[in-house]
Image (cartoon, grey):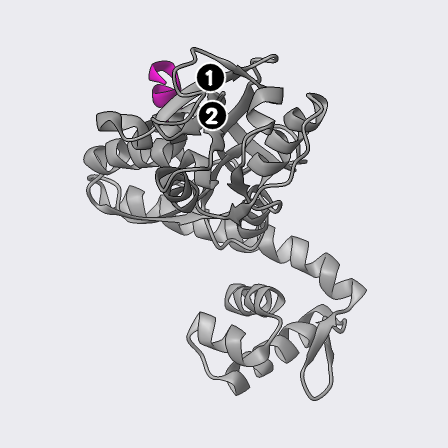
Amino acid sequence: MIDKLEMFIALAQARHFGRAAEAVGVTQPTLSAAIKGLEDQLGVMLVRRGSRFQGLTPEGSRALDWARRIVGDARAMREELRVARGGGGLSGNLRIAAIPTALSVVARLTARFAAAHPGVKISVTSSSSAGILAMLDDLAVDAGLTYLEGEPLGRVVRVPLYDERYVLLLHPDAALAGRTTVTWAEAGAMPLCLLTPVMQNRRIIAGHLSEAGAEVAPQVESDSITVLAGNVMAGGMATILPDRAARVFTRDGGLVAVPVVSPDARHPVGLIAPWREPHTPVIAALLAEGRRQAEAL
């Protein structure tokens, strides 16, 4: 039953029988038979079929919520029993998704976690805040590093880590590079490059710029802060980043970061994981490490 539910989740995520089969490592006929068998067991049609996948039925959408809970709990049970049976340190996989502006913080978190638990293999994916929530729902990641306000997070456990504050990142030769602070209105008057609108950071910054009466019309947009910093380094442009994300580009006199004030905006960022008691030992250890990190950040 659990295997069939996992295939059903994969199909709902991929929206394609072939890609779903590839994701779970079975043939397409095997996956199709598993979905049909699940429908027979539940007594309802879950998937609209034609020559290709046409979506979930209303019953399928409801069943998907239950499938995610059941599969998540089953994975947690297997992991807990494996650790209890084997003893010793933690092992397994840990998949984390983080908003681009928090990648420097997630690197610190994973470095310390890896040092404490060398048997755990960690993978980190960069995504928008909405993408992180979708991946958590689909069981595609185990935890996320994202904003704790501005978008509904649903049923998750939260560990606040730090408040995001903002700086104007400038070339050392820029006119405002010698200032101790700049206002949002002054920052908005610069030729800007910003993250794309799909990113919550962009929406936060656009909101503050609009409140200051500045037009939000960046000349360059990207989903990578490295690309934004590269445009600033080339000269003639500026960007607005969280202070922690900007630090890597201000070392050794590369670029200049000037705090943006009026207002001194702050937005909380933290670690989230699906609400489940008990958590797997790996997730419980990650949350504990996050709480320790929060005290030092």
* Type of amino acid at the residue the image marks with label 1: Pro
Q: Where are the magenta residues, as a range?
A: 290-297
Q: Earlier in the sequence, mark 2 or mark 1?
A: 2
Alpha carbon distance from label 2 to label 1: 6 Å
Say above or below: 65 vs 231.
Answer: below
* Type of amino acid at the residue the image marks with label 2: Leu
- Left or right of 222? Residue 296 is left
| Callout 2 touching callout 1 (CB < 8 Å) | yes
Secondary structure beneath disc 1? strand
Question: What is the quadrant of the C terminus in the image?
Answer: top left
Q: Which mark is residue 157?
A: none
On the image, the x and y values in percent for residue 12 come to: 62, 66
- Left or right of 58? Residue 33 is left
- Residue annotated with mark 1: 259
Queried whether the magenta region covers residue 117, the answer comes back as no
- Residue annotated with mark 2: 168
Residue at image coords 49%, 52%:
74
Residue at image coords 41%, 29%:
170
